[in-house]
Image: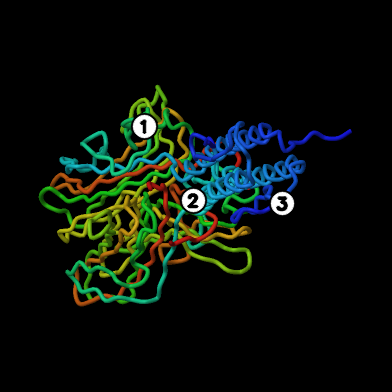
Amino acid sequence: MTLSCPEGSNYAAIAKQLHETAMQAEERISELEQELRSAVNRPTIVQTFTAPQTGFIDNLESNFGSSVGPFVYPFNNVPGDFTVDNSDDTYIYLGEGIYEIGVSATAVPAGVVNDNSIRIWQIKHYRPDPGSLDPVLPGFSFVDRTASTQVEANSVIGVKVAMAGTFRIMPGDRILFTILHTNTLSTITLSDIKCYMSKVSDASLTEVL
Amino acid sequence: MPTNTLNFNLPYPSGTDAPCDFDEQWCDFTAAIDSVFDTFQAALDRTVPVIPAAKLRLSAPADFVDSSPVIFDSVVFDTAGFTDLDADPYHIFINRTGRYTVTCMSVVITQATIPPGFLGTWVLVEDGLGGGDFTAMNQATDVGGGLGYFIPGYEAVLTITAGSRLSLVFTAGSIVIRNMLEAYMSVHWHSDTERPS
Amino acid sequence: MPASTPIYGFTYPCPDEVISPSAFTTLANQIDAKLLDVEADRFLALNRFNSDLDSAVVQTVTNGVDTTLTIPSSTYTLPMSGVYVFHVTVLPQTFPATISTTQATVHLNTVYQFGQTQNNEGNSTRNIAPSGPITGVAGDIITTRVFYVGSGTMNVRAHMSVKMLVRTA
């Protein structure tokens, strides 16, 4: 028996093979290229807030960020207008996973400064819990946080924070940014507010070494 | 005699090859391409949708010795077998060398007998060979008072080798027993190698 | 006339054509070249840009002067357009007689991005360690500035770690 193979006159078979190889290679290369590019394009949102947020009263943990004022996106590769904080929809859309979240801001007393008064900044992670009476977010229970305590030095420049942490977030969970201060002699004004979120990984799978 | 491409050495039929050899030669060509595809897929499998990551948390107050590892009581996530809380509630163990992001937080009440005082936290990385590194360091000034001191630490990236273990350390300047109200330590892979440019 | 694939334009002969060895050569080299492009993507997926810079070199900062650091571990040039996260630690090495607060800020081509302050009650220096995101293009320069309220001068050194989150170009 002899194997058939393209002969000098059987040009069509070779042409067909080259065509198939070209098309199949292109399809697979295109697939891999897109997936590899998405590996360096993880869902990420960066927001900067375009106006100071004012009137924060002493000894009352208060929200700041998306729940308070307008913002723009220096970067956002998540379709839609999702926000890092104050949104249930964001993490419904993006799904369960491990997220890196950070926030930065400047706090300056609007009036008189209490030297050595405290500023506690928090990135707080909440989960839906209908029976919860949490003072910051009723209907949600506290899960986790990254927080920073700073002390006002009464040196005109105020207090700046820039921190980040990682969270395991489920669909429907909410992230809030809060501040609690003890500057009893005046309210606090926040400016230069910036935040970011990046989905680092799924959380429920085991990685391939 | 097949010729080979420049970059991936893919063999393809040349002008001196007999048409009857086309089948085998072309199969060699497509197999070589498949092999390259496999390496691309292997890279994807290591990065999407899951990467090595782990986070330990202390949710209820616990005593610890200043400058010694802090104990944790829960695993927030572990995608890579980096933790075994039952066997060791103090450490995250790394089993894949790479460049990692490290974050941490310590929470204490005022520790200063006479304020102001010093508060510091960091993650200690021990490489299992006697070497170590401090990372995600942060400090704060303790001015006394009734509110908690939250001290977060962060390191965007550093090299951690397989066989290393991480622990959270806190100090207020003297080796005594202290009480940690809340804490966490987390690590996640960013890349295989340092690549500044 | 050869035809070509819709995305990358890999060429292949049509059935009515005379096939010469160049048909094999052309297609093989086209695929090979495209694989090289994707290899760059593979490498980046496993090795997004990142660096951690440390130096024992110190710089002197004068009280009341917002000083841009020029020491090696205080600056970074973006190698590729993207979103990066930076972490800077400023470490005081000498101790002014008086110091009440210290601030470290990070800038993109001189534009403020984020920063951190420390209270130095009791005239005690502290490390200052801000971290945050920066969106920029290749060639953008990231710098660190230090400012403190107090007396005299203070020597500082710096540590910077940076990682790329997302590629934008």
Could you tell me which secondary element the residue under label 1 belongs to?
loop
- Which numbered disc flags the more N-terminal residue, 3 or 2? 3
* Left or right: A63 in relation to A28: left
> Is residue B74 shown to the viewer in this render?
no
Name the residue carrying label 1: A79
Q: Quadrant of residue A17?
A: top right
* Residue at the (43%, 32%) spot, across then down: A94
Marks 1 and 3 sit apart, C-alpha to C-alpha, by 54 Å
Are the residues under badges 3 and 2 in a single subunit? Answer: yes
* Residue at the (22%, 67%) spot, across then down: C148
Q: Is A6 rendered above or below residue B175?
A: above
Name the residue carrying label 2: B185
* Left or right: A201 in relation to C164: right
Residue located farthest toward the top when viewing the structure as drawn = A130
Disc 3: host chain = B
Circle 1: residue type: Pro
Circle 2: residue type: Met
Are the residues under badges 1 and 2 in a single subunit? Answer: no
Closer to the observer: label 1 or label 3? 3
Could you tell me which secondary element the residue under label 2 belongs to?
strand
Could you tell me which secondary element the residue under label 3 belongs to?
loop
> Is residue A106 shown to the viewer in this render?
yes
- Callout 1: 10 Å neighbours few (<14), some, many (20+)? few
Residue located farthest toward the left when viewing the structure as drawn = A111
Taking depth in this image into account, of C110 and C25 the one nearest to the observer is C25
Q: Quadrant of residue C64?
A: bottom left
Marks 1 and 2 sit apart, C-alpha to C-alpha, by 32 Å
Circle 3: residue type: Thr
What x and y, as percent, mark residue C89? 36, 63
